[in-house]
Image (cartoon, rainbow, N blue to C red):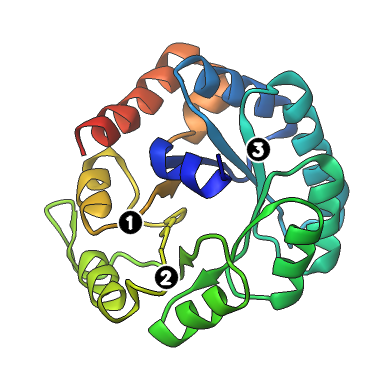
């Protein structure tokens, strides 16, 4: 089964963003124990050693959790794509569409998930060979009573003229992604939704509080099942 089809079934991707190195395995273990499947580790452009640090994290996760699907996020260029692939990343997520990154992903046997926002950008990403398209950037405009009104309208409006050409997988790792918004996000026709801070909140991660972290992850899974 293609990775894009597996993600369509899972409907959710958890993002390890700015997680301390000594907490990465802890977060992954709790996530996996509750049935999680897709896990993304992001590069940090502000870290001069991000190629090595992120690569090490991906490599360790692949070794300790071979049943998880591990990928890299914030893949901005070919060196990042190569480093992620060397570490065993199975998918590469980018905030924009780089044909070179997409080509590198496919050459190394990984799925390419570039970011796009407008219909023109989405179509260009698809034509460049994207396996799925990440809707980016995302904001909290139109957020009313935990319903991503603006988000939903944008996805629906963008899908109408493109539905025969593209399948979109909007991941929203920064703003507005929380258990209360997952149902409305998936109801737009999104293939899957991704979240980081709401899945791995700093407090329980820092305290190594397994119970609190598991409770937070379960809240997301519950909404996805009902969504």
Circle 3: is it few (<14), some (14-19), or many (20+) Cα within 10 Å?
Answer: many
**Label 1 to label 3, Cα distance in Å?**
21 Å
From the viewer's side, name the closer residue of 24 and 108: 108
- Quarter holding the C terminus is top left
Q: Is residue 76 visible?
A: no
Q: Quadrant of residue 18?
A: top right
The reply, left or right, for residue 120 in relation to residue 41 is left
* Residue bearing the label numbered 3: 70
Q: Are marks 1 and 2 in contact (CB under 8 Å)?
A: no
Residue 112's spot in the image, x, y percent? 63, 60
User: Could you say where residue 159 lies in the image, as x and y percent from the top left?
Assistant: 30, 72
Residue shown at the point (46%, 77%) measured from the top left: 122
Q: Give the foreground label among 3 and 2.
A: 2
x 41%, y 64%: residue:
167
Of 172 and 156, nearer the camera is 156
Whole-angstrom CA distance, mark 3 to mark 2, is 24 Å
Determine whether, in the image, residue 159 is placed left or right of residue 70: left
The mark closer to the camera, 1 or 2, is 2
Q: Where does label 2 land, which residue?
A: 166
Disc 1 designates what residue?
190
Mark closer to the chain start, 1 or 2: 2
Q: Judge the density around disc 1: few (<14), some (14-19), many (≥20) Cα neighbours within 10 Å.
A: many
């Amino acid at each position: 089964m293609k990775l894009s089809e597996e993600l369509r079934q899972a409907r959710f991707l958890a993002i390890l963003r700015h997680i301390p190195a000594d907490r990465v395995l802890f977060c992954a273990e709790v996530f996996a124990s509750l049935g999680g499947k897709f896990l993304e580790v992001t590069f940090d452009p502000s870290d001069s050693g991000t190629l090595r640090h992120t690569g090490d994290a991906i490599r360790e996760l692949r070794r300790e959790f071979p049943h998880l699907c591990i990928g890299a996020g914030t893949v901005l260029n070919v060196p990042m794509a190569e480093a992620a692939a060397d570490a065993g990343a199975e998918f590469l997520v980018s905030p924009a569409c780089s044909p070179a990154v997409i080509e590198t992903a496919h050459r190394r046997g990984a799925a390419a998930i570039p970011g796009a926002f407008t219909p023109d950008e989405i179509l260009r990403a698809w034509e460049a060979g994207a396996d799925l398209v990440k809707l980016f950037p995302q904001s909290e405009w139109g957020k009313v009573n935990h319903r991503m009104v603006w988000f939903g309208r944008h996805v629906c409006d963008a899908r109408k003229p493109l539905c025969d050409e593209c399948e979109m997988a909007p991941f929203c790792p920064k703003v507005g992604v929380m258990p209360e918004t997952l149902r409305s996000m998936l109801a737009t026709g999104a293939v899957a939704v991704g979240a980081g801070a709401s899945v791995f909140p700093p407090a329980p991660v820092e305290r190594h509080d397994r119970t609190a972290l598991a409770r937070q992850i379960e809240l997301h899974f519950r909404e996805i099942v009902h969504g």
